[in-house]
Amino acid sequence: MQSLFQILMLILDIVWFFVVAHVIMSWLISFQVLNVRQQLVGQIWYGLNRILEPLYGPIRRILPPMSGLDLAPLVVLVGIFALRIILQNNVAFFL
């Protein structure tokens, strides 16, 4: 059962990395450091969007419009941290 705990923590770490990479890329694209028309940048950007949209979509429907400010990644990161805390506090269940 400890293996299940470690796999769940690994999945949460990977999702956390994807969200952080998406946020950083969105900033770099907004400040025109990166150009989506470049093939590699475009593929990474659209790939991250396709991976993370199932997480962001329901949150964006619940959150009120913030005039260009997207808080969905912040809510996802808080949710990941909350899940990590819940799993770590219940690690005895997995032993």
Image: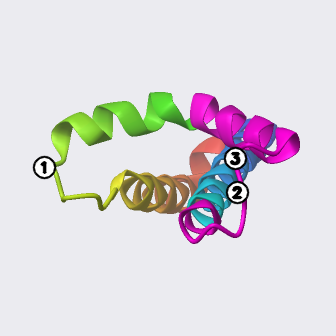
What amino acid type is highlighted by mark number 3? Val
Q: Residue at position x 53%, y 64% from top?
A: 30
Residue 20: x %, y % from top left: 62, 61
Q: 10 Å neighbourhood of mark 1: few (<14), some, or many (≥20)?
A: few
In the image, the segment drawn in magenta is 27-51
- The mark that comes first in sequence, 2 or 3, is 2
For discs 2 and 1, the disc positioned in front in the rendered view? 1
Residue 73: x %, y % from top left: 44, 55
Q: Residue at position x 28%, y 58% from top?
A: 68
Q: Would you name the residue on which mark 1 appears?
A: 64
C-alpha span from label 2 to label 3: 20 Å
Residue 23: x %, y % from top left: 57, 61
Residue 40 visible, this orientation: yes
Q: Would you name the residue on which mark 2 appears?
A: 17
Q: Secondary structure at mark 1?
A: loop
Does the stretch in magenta take in 17?
no
Q: Quadrant of residue 58?
A: top left
Q: Main secondary structure of the magenta part?
A: helix
CB under 8 Å between discs 2 and 1: no
Residue 1 visible, this orientation: no
